[in-house]
Image (cartoon, rainbow, N blue to C red):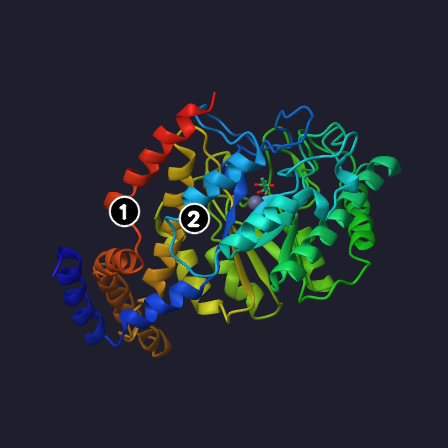
């Protein structure tokens, strides 16, 4: 017996004694889909033939070697990352500018499934499905920081057409892969300083969205999501698509509300929002990220926020109402390591939640015994979930955390460092 197996056998006994079957937890974790965000690999730059400066209030800092410069390189990097992730139903989410190619003179308003042909071949051969997000930043038509809420009808038209194009691409993905694609709208629209008129841009965003969603696309092909944000860099005073705006919109129009965990005030608990929304409204898309001071997109670490989110995700997920996409980007460390270690941290948070013992925690609360609730909650923290995680990795032919830099380092040497 290896050390991992010995430790697992002991951990299994501990969990069985508190009413939990680790095998069941691991089997369930295998089935929880995760959409891996492609943009960690290319620093949110995309592959259009135009000025690539990142605008719209997001920033990627660092110049670690090996950014993917083409869709081919990005797919190769995704292969390297996906190989190190557990889960049978993982997906990949593309930003719309991560195209295979653009036709001469083509712009985002006329994108179609053709522009993603190799992505489809690649995904099919890997047995994964694709999601999409329209891209409103890094483009001259994001004018004075506004896109779908711009006062000029021509600019709004361009972005409305881009969003409609992405919905069609998503629907085509849905048909190709036999599972609905999520298409997530996040516009950077807002102002650096105090607006004179807070209402008009929101009225315009609303009208744009209503036009965009006027065409019904079956939910078997496409799930539309809308993503709010508190503020971005250079967009500090006012965001058109605030949380209040989109939560109301999603509820009214039967859309997914996208909660990006980096898009709220730092003292707000995103975990707390899941039950509040799930008990009233359909579906939530989580953009799982880590806010650090003013940045919304740090790589996930296994901190209390992530553990809370994993727990609430497990408690509120009925298998069809919660969708998980990662959303972080770091160019200061090996990008594959960022992708993989961050993603595995989310999977660990889910596993820990799936391993939650039946130790009377909720019963104590129902009985009003908050002392017992406190004691039991703290007791759970020293359960041997690490032994289960390591065994989970080994039993799925994946490296453990201690081994993870081996394959990543080899790929860096063989592939990433050769990119100039
Ligand atoms: C930005 C939003 C959005 C982006 C992607 C790259 O703050 O979170 O989801 O991260 O469009
Ligand atoms: Zn996001």
| Left or right, 326 with reference to 245 | left
Q: Position of residue 33 (x, y in %)?
A: 48, 60
Q: Position of residue 249 (x, y in %)?
A: 71, 57
Q: Position of residue 134 (x, y in %)?
A: 68, 44
Single out the mark in the foreground, 1 or 2. Answer: 2
Name the mark on residue 303: none
At x 76% / y 43%, what residue is drawn?
A: 162
Q: Quadrant of residue 14?
A: bottom left
**Which residue is label 2 attached to?**
82
Name the mark on residue 401: 1
Quarter of the image with the N terminus is: bottom left
The one nearer the camera, 275 or 341, is 341
Q: Quadrant of residue 369?
A: bottom left
The one nearer the camera, 364 or 400, is 400
Q: Earlier in the sequence, mark 1 or mark 2?
A: 2
The one nearer the camera, 36 or 322, is 36
At x 15% / y 60%, what residue is drawn?
A: 7
SS at circle 2: helix
| Left or right, 282 with reference to 389 | right
Q: Are marks 1 and 2 in contact (CB under 8 Å)?
A: no
Question: Residue lying farthest right?
Answer: 153
Question: Residue lying farthest top?
Answer: 420
The one nearer the camera, 303 or 191, is 303
């Amino acid at each position: 017996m290896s050390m991992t197996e010995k430790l697992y056998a002991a951990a299994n006994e501990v969990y069985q004694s508190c009413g939990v079957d680790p095998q069941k937890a691991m089997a369930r974790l295998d089935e929880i889909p995760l959409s891996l965000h492609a943009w960690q690999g290319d620093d949110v730059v995309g592959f259009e033939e135009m000025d690539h400066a990142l605008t719209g209030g997001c920033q990627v800092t660092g110049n670690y070697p090996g950014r993917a410069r083409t869709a081919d390189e990005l797919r190769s990097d995704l292969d390297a990352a996906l190989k190190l992730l557990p889960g049978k139903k993982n997906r990949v989410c593309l930003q719309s500018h991560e195209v295979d190619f653009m036709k001469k003179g083509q712009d985002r308003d006329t994108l179609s499934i053709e522009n993603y042909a190799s992505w489809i071949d690649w995904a099919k051969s890997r047995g994964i499905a694709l999601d999409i997000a329209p891209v409103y930043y890094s483009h001259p038509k994001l004018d004075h920081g506004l896109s779908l809420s711009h006062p000029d009808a021509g600019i709004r038209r361009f972005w409305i057409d881009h969003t409609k194009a992405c919905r069609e691409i998503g629907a085509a993905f849905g048909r190709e892969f036999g599972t609905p694609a999520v298409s997530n709208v996040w516009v950077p629209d807002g102002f650096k300083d105090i607006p004179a008129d807070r209402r008009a841009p929101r009225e315009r965003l609303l009208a744009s969205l209503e036009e965009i969603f006027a065409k019904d696309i079956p939910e078997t092909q496409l799930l539309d999501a809308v993503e709010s944000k508190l503020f971005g860099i250079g967009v500090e005073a006012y965001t058109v698509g605030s949380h209040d705006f989109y939560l109301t919109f999603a509820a009214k129009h039967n859309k997914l509300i996208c909660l990006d965990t980096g898009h709220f005030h730092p003292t707000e608990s995103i975990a707390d929002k899941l039950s509040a929304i799930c008990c009233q409204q359909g579906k939530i898309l989580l953009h799982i990220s880590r806010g650090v001071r003013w940045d919304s997109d740090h790589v996930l670490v296994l901190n209390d926020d992530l553990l809370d989110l994993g727990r609430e995700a497990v408690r509120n997920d009925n298998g069809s109402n919660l969708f998980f996409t990662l959303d972080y980007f770091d160019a200061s460390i090996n990008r594959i390591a960022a992708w993989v270690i961050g993603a595995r941290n989310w999977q660990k948070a889910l596993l820990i939640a799936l391993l939650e013992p039946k130790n009377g925690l909720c019963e104590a609360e129902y009985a009003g015994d908050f002392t017992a609730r406190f004691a039991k909650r703290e007791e759970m923290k020293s359960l041997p979930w690490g032994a289960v995680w390591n065994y989970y990795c080994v039993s799925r032919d994946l490296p453990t955390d201690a081994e993870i830099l081996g394959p990543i380092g080899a790929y860096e040497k063989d592939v990433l460092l050769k990119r100039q």
